[in-house]
Image (cartoon, helix red, strand yellow):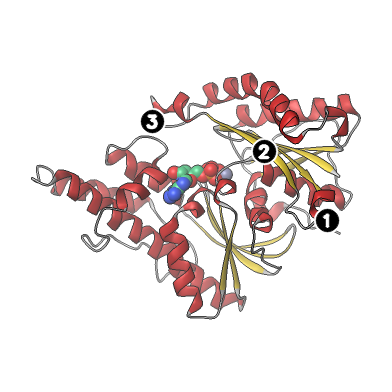
Amino acid sequence: MKVLGLETSCDETGLAIFDSDHLAEGKNGLLGQVLYSQIELHATYGGVVPELASRDHIRKLVPLLDELLKLCQISKDEIDAIAFTKGPGLIGALMTGALFGRSLAYGLGVPAIGVHHMEGHLLSPLLGDNPPRFPFVSLLVSGGHTLLVAAYGIGEYEILGESIDDAAGECFDKAAKMLGLPYPGGPNVASLAETGDANAYDLPRPMLHKGLDFSFSGMKTAVHNLIKDTEGSDTDAKVRADIAASFQHAVVDTLVKKCVKALKQTGMSQLVIAGGVSANLHLRESLEVELAKINATVHYAPLELCTDNGAMIAYAGYQRLKAGQADDLAVSCVPRWSLSELPALV
Ligand code: KG4
Ligand code: ZN
């Protein structure tokens, strides 16, 4: 089954084809993917402007589909089903992919299914070289979400903890802005941190000893105060790198400790990390070290599938279509949608 996946929940237009027959040949099933990032469009504003995002998705969807079909060397008629991101995300942006996908599926006479964006992220490590097996704990860290989830099977998710305020990626983005780094902040903070001393400043690790929830909003105040306190320092570039490294270390340390706690609490031995922040190499390395100490393993998607992409939507859609699920002709997007509301596969 060839499933076209469409991701348009925020500022990336991602399209991919997942082919289950390709999977049978010992491959991960991905025939090809194309991705257009709107970073440049939003950079001037320091963050995503929803209306501009929707308009740009509309401009890019048709040419990207043509490019994808060429890349995969297939024609439109060979598409067996279409999966699109139904939520959570920006309503206008979601509507573009959903309407495009639903209409195209109708025109082609094939089924369509709306996919939960975070389920796409959660399942994306199954497309990696070292896929986990259910059950596992998943740390979902993106620009809009920070979630610890016990995953017992597809659609069988128990939320163990979540951020009570800012998401981890959002916190990276805000720290980047304060450090004068361009949007999106995560990768830029990470690269500035490479030259800094992670122990230069002692930043807070919020809610470390309080269950499995997170709180990151205090971090931005801490970074703000640190920048103010060190202003005018002779070695400005060095100080900024030290702040970036200390900040990254504090966020990663908090995430790692909560993951270890979640594994111990559930008795599970596999951790999956997914979402944009899972591309952070310091996070990956710290988890490898700390999880080895408790005989647990960490699994993640290939780097290019950590941030938003169409492949994870095609894959999650395939799993549900294979189980006989599909959406009807009505298109309804869900900007706020909890993973725990998803139906299990029967
Ligand atoms: O999953 P994603 O692409 O989009 C959402 O669904 O939100 O995640 C984007 C987030 C942004 O906040 C970005 O700054 C962060 O992931 N991010 C990173 C890194 N790469 C992306 N944060 C830390 N380190 C990175 N290397
Ligand atoms: Zn995402």
Q: Nearer the viewer, mark 2 or mark 3?
A: 2
Answer with left or right where residue 183 lies relative to residue 297. Answer: left
Q: Amino acid at mark 2?
A: Gln
Q: Quick check: can you spot residue 143?
A: no
Q: Which residue is mark 2?
A: 33
Work out whether 187 lies above or below 158. above
Q: Depth check: give the residue in front, 22 or 271.
A: 22
Tag shown at residue 46: 3
Q: Quadrant of residue 334?
A: top right
Give the residue type at disc 3. Gly
Q: Nearer the viewer, mark 3 or mark 1?
A: 1
| Residue 220 picture location, percent across and down | 31, 48
Q: Residue at x 72, y 53 (%)?
A: 28
> Which residue matches tag 1?
24
Is residue 227 depicted above or below 122 in this figure?
above
Question: Disc 3 or 1, which lies upstream in sequence?
Answer: 1
Q: Position of residue 103 (x, y in %)?
A: 81, 25
